[in-house]
Structures are given as C-alpha cells and as structure tokens.
Image (spheres, rainbow, N blue to C red):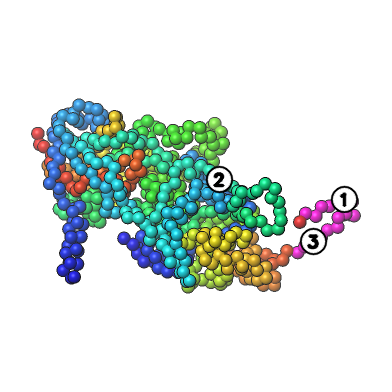
Amino acid sequence: MGHQVFNWQINRKMNYWYPEHRPARQIGYVFDINKCIACQTCTLACKTTWTGGRGQEAMLWNNVETKPFGFYPTAWDVKLLEKLGAQSWGEDEYEGQTIFEAAPKGERMLGFRPEDEDWSYPNLGEDEVSEPIPAGMHLQGLQTSWMFYLARICNHCTYPACLAGCPRMAIYKRPEDGIVLVDQRNCRGHRECVRACPYKKVFFNTVTGTSEKCIGCFPKIESGFQPQCVTHCIGKIRLQGFVNPPDRMREDNPIDYLVHVKKLALPLYPQFGLEPNVYYMPPIHVPRRVLRMMFGPAAEKAVETYRSAAEDPKLLGAMLLFGSTERILHSFKVANDFAIGFDEKGAEISRVPLREPIYVRPYHDQARGVYRHNTP
Amino acid sequence: MGLLFTLAWLVAQDKQQDGRRLLDVELVSSFTSERLAWEDPDHRSWTAQPALKLKLIPQQVQEPMLMAPTIGEMRVRAIHNRSWIAFYLEWDDPTNSNTLRSDRFGDAAAVEFPLSMNPLPEYRMGDEGRPVQLALWRAERQRAFEEKVDFLAENYPRLWCDNYAFAPTAFGFLGTPAIRAEQERYLAAQAVGNPSRIGVAPPVEELSAQTWNRLTVQKSQDSRGRGIWKDGRWRTVIARPLVTADSEDASFDGKFSWAVAFASWDGGRQNAGPRKMVVEGWIKLKLETK
C-alpha cells in the first residue's frame, strides 16, 4: 500500500503511506549550526517545561549532540544509514531510495527501535573530534580534525514516518500549523512510531505506557510566540516561523528566504524522504563529503553563501533577527541598516541594527577615578 | 494474457475472502451450572474437557507484519454457565514477559467475536461497517493492575531523580490540589484519560475494531480474565457475560452457535500490536445446552 506524493527536498515524487496533504501552514525552524556552543540551554528549557515527570527521566525532546561521535540515542543516524546502504543524488533529484521506498517486506518503512540503553548516554561523544590528536600536536593554522554541535528536535515532517508507522492512527499532523502530535488518549504503546522515526524523536514513557514527543510548544505557537528551545537559546542560533513549499514561498518570510531564496538552510538527511522542517545552516569547517551526506548536495553552496553573508545586507538582516524577539516573525525587511521583523498583521515586533555601534571607552575614567576593562 | 490476469485477480479475491469464512473447526463450550472461576487458571474445572488445538500463523495481511512465526499453537477450551462464557487458553512460551521498558513488551492473548454472522467480517480486526469485539489480556497490565508493580522502579532500581517537576513526593509532602493537577499534566496520557494506561487498564480490555486503523477501547468493560505463567507455558482465562447491554459486544442472547477467533503475542520476541500470531480463520463456536 502506498501513495505517490511530491517531496520538494528530493525534487521528485516518492512513495508514502498516506496521500499528500499539506497543512494550511507548516511550522519551520532554521538553526545556525555555526553559532551553537552546546550549552544545552535549549535542552533544559524544553526539559523543565515539558518532560519533568516520572517516566520522562531519559527523555530529551531537544538535545544537542557533538558530531561525528555524538548520538542520542546511540548511533541513531549511522545505524539507519547503514541499513539504507549507499544511495546517490543525481543532477536535479535524489536517485536513491527513501526509507519508505526501502521498506522491507511486511514493514511500512525501513527503521529500527533502539534498545533501552541507547537512550542512556545523551552526552556520548561530547566534544570529541573526528580523529585522534597525536602527541605534540599544536595549533599551526587550520586543523584537520573537526567537530560540530548538532541541535535536534522533532522535525514536524511533512511526511512523518511516526505518523505513517502508527497502526492505530494515534499520531496526527495538525492542519493549522503542521505540528505532529501523539494522541495521548488513543496511543496504545506499540512503539511503531519509535521504530519508524529516523531521527529517533519519539520516546516511550514507561509510566504511562504511551509514546511521547516534541509538541512544538503548540500553546505558545497558538499565542504567537516561538517555542521554548528557540527563545531560550543564548547563542541566538534559532528562528521559528512557518515554511512554505517552493511554489508558495514568500521572499519576505525569513524562513522561506533562508531556505528557498538563499538556499542557505538545509534539511537534515533529506534522503530519508520525510521532508523535515528543521533547516540547518551547515557548519562551514566540516569536510564537504560529511555535509553532503547529512544535508544533501546543496551543502557546499550553502557554505559559500554563509561565508559571504556579511556582504549581503538582506541575508545578514535575516540572520540577525534570530533571537531578537519571542514573537513569531512572519515577515521581515532590511531598511536603513536595520533588519525589521513583523508579526502576522504586519506590525513591527523587532528591529536590529546590521552593525552594532562600537563604543571605545577610555581606560581611565577620570570622572569616577577608576580604571576599566574593555571586554570584547 | 487477459485470461491470466483475470485468473490472478480471482485468486487474489479468493485469498481476500479467506478471512471472512468459517473454518471447518468447531470449539464446543461445555455447560456447567457452577460459577466460572475466571480468576483462577489453576481451577480443576478448566481441564475437565479435552482441548482444541489451533494452529497459529503470523499476521501477514497488514503492515507492520510478523514475518517469522513465534507461537505455533494455542490449546483452547470453553465453558459457559448460561450467564458467562470463559475461554481457557494455553500456549507455550519459554519466557515470561510481564514487564514494561522502552524495548520490552508483555505477552498477551485475545479472543475475538464478530457482531454479526451474516456476513462475517474479516477475522483480522473486522471490516468497516462490520465490527468485531475483542477481549485482550496483557501480562504486564495484569502485574501493574493486580500487584501495583512500578515498572520504572523494577527496571531501574538505582534510579534517582533530584526533583520531579511538581511531584508531591519530591519534597516529602503530599501537595496541594493545584500541585497535584500540575503533576498530572506531566502524565499526559493520564491527564486526558487514556483508558489503556498502565496501572489503570484492567488485565483484560474490551475493544471494538472495524479494520486495523479503527480500534477503540469500549466504554463498557465487561470481560474479565487472568493468566499464569509456569514451566514455559501460559494458561490464561478470558471470560465475558453471554449477554450485555453493550451494543459493541457480540450478543449470545438465545444463540447457541457463533464464531470466535484467537490471537497471541510473544512479548519476549517483540510481538506487539499487529505483529502477532493469529488463528487461520473464524472458528465455529457451539454452546452446549446441558
């Protein structure tokens, strides 16, 4: 059983369990990986808001892991990539198989359910770099070893595998904002969703016997505010808004602008075929083959765009609006060296200068008779 | 070519209809004037009659399927007393799976009845407009319900959490109603009244199904049951009143022949939901009058 649906991230039709049905608008996020310092403030903001109960001890709807050796749960992505096998991208589209197309006989998609212990080491591989550091190594310009922090939440996918995998239809995608939820009243704890989600962002609660997942902070979304993990990010690496498919994209929508116009923000593992809606500005110092595997063939160009962002006032403006307001930005513009963000009704809710003014204060304050430190 | 296609289509249609037929197998429910001891699978009354051996096959009509068989056979007996009917189910399972963890499932068994005999619904979860009634017994639910087992404490005996948000026990006091209400919000399934949640759901849960996707917990829970695992074998009784006021139940009012089907799950081998072993079709059920 299956339906042909169009997935713009792989630029072709693909097989999915249900027909194509896009919500009125789709929640979307952009994360600037280059700015993440893995302080885990997002993790704690989410944890203390939503998963502080019994049965949720090892449940992190938001986590930040260090790539290449950090995983939560253990080996979540490399295990599935290995199962999927070598696949290829063509000139214009993905030529390989998605997890739906690679479903073994008797399954709705290719997947696996992690073992219990796999959820027990959320900081596995933290701060580890890609290769051993030889004795005596010291800074000599560019380093060959690399690592980066990957902040992860539910992708509120356009084609959610968790939803397709649930044999009881207890998972649904909200028509008004595309947020994917587990119906806590009807979930029967079969954990097919845990097996199905390639990003392993559905969790099992032993106390209630049901599956639970990120709810996109929907009470905040309904009130016009961005989610907790976004607004608490001290590095201001995140922006939440609504993302449109390419044929309906709006250039003044900051998410659409970064995703579709500048093609700077890319989906994570688009080859899995879920059309995930968290978009990443890829880390610029990571080998291209790794970026291509994780973010698709557009990664190399995205790195170039990122490197030249400072010369593009509009792009710079869109990036500077990250973390500038708790309200949801529906549109933006750059004018008079300011990036200005607007709410749904077009009212200004954020204004950020493209260049912060620099104040150099004298080392000695004569008026107060004190010495100062200027901290950059 | 056209003839071949037609033949293939007819074979496929015939295969589809297989699940809506009565097998040439009859389970006779003996009559007793005594009360049915559904809570005691050790009771002598259960084994007074010979068992009907039923072959089980993996569920392979709806994804996700069970691709490799787990439980090969179920031995079934039935007894009624004009008010209740009970099914005594025996199957071999080397492991007693009766706990709950993210990667562990409980053993289970189910009895199923069509609500109408003509036409019969598909015995694997019914058809739209032709519902089936299910009575599902689950091992871990029995422990949670009867023994009040805390699976979190059982599986993680050294677990320590500094503070559960809004948990009354966190600071050693019982908490105000407001705090208790907040605590319940962190157990979302409990807050919205999921009838299947652990510790609340009885060992036997009555369900209605009209195809795989349309499975609901019945509002009126009339079935009872209990299982015992010993020496690599489950012996489980599932009982229900012959007549109820519940429109979601198959009614035996004035009827002495009906249809029944059985299913079983080996939790130790990750059987859950549609990944289960089922009988080969509807079994004829005959109720002895004396």
Q: Which residue is mark 2?
A: A124
Q: Is there one chain holding both mark 3 and mark 1? A: yes
B260 above or below A81?
A: above
Q: Main secondary structure of the magenta part?
A: loop
Disc with the residue nearer the chain's start (3 vs 2)? 2
Task: Identify residue type, mark 2.
Answer: Leu
The residue shown at (89%, 51%) is: A369
Q: Mark 1 is on which residue type? A: Val
Q: Would you say the residues marked 3 and 1 are in contact, meaning their CB atoms lie under 8 Å apart? A: no
Instruction: Name the residue at 34% across, 45% down.
Output: B272
Give the distance between the C-alpha atoms of the residues marked 3 and 1, in whole angstroms: 18 Å
Question: Residue A222 versus residue A331: which sits nearer the camera?
Answer: A331
Q: Which mark is residue A370?
A: 1
Q: Position of residue A132 (x, y in %)?
A: 61, 49
Neighbourhood count class around disc 1 (C-alpha, 10 Å): few under 14, some 14–19, many 20 upward: few
| Horizontal and vertical percent position of residue A289 | 54, 61
Q: Is residue B232 inside the magenta stretch?
A: no
Where are the magenta residues, as a range?
Answer: A357-375
Asked if both marks, 3 and 2, belong to the same chain, the answer given is yes
Query: Is tag 2's residue or tag 1's residue first in the polypeptide sequence?
Result: 2
Residue A319 percent location from the top left of the image = 63, 64
Chain letter of disc 3 in the image: A
Q: Which amino acid, mark 3?
A: Tyr
Count of numbered circles in the view? 3
A368 vs A191, left or right, is right
- Can you say which quadrant of the picture contains the N terminus of chain A? bottom left
- Report the disc number at residue A359: 3
Q: Secondary structure at mark 2?
A: loop
Q: Is residue B75 left or right of residue A347?
A: left
Chain on which label 2 sits = A
> Residues under labels 2 and 1: Cα distance?
47 Å
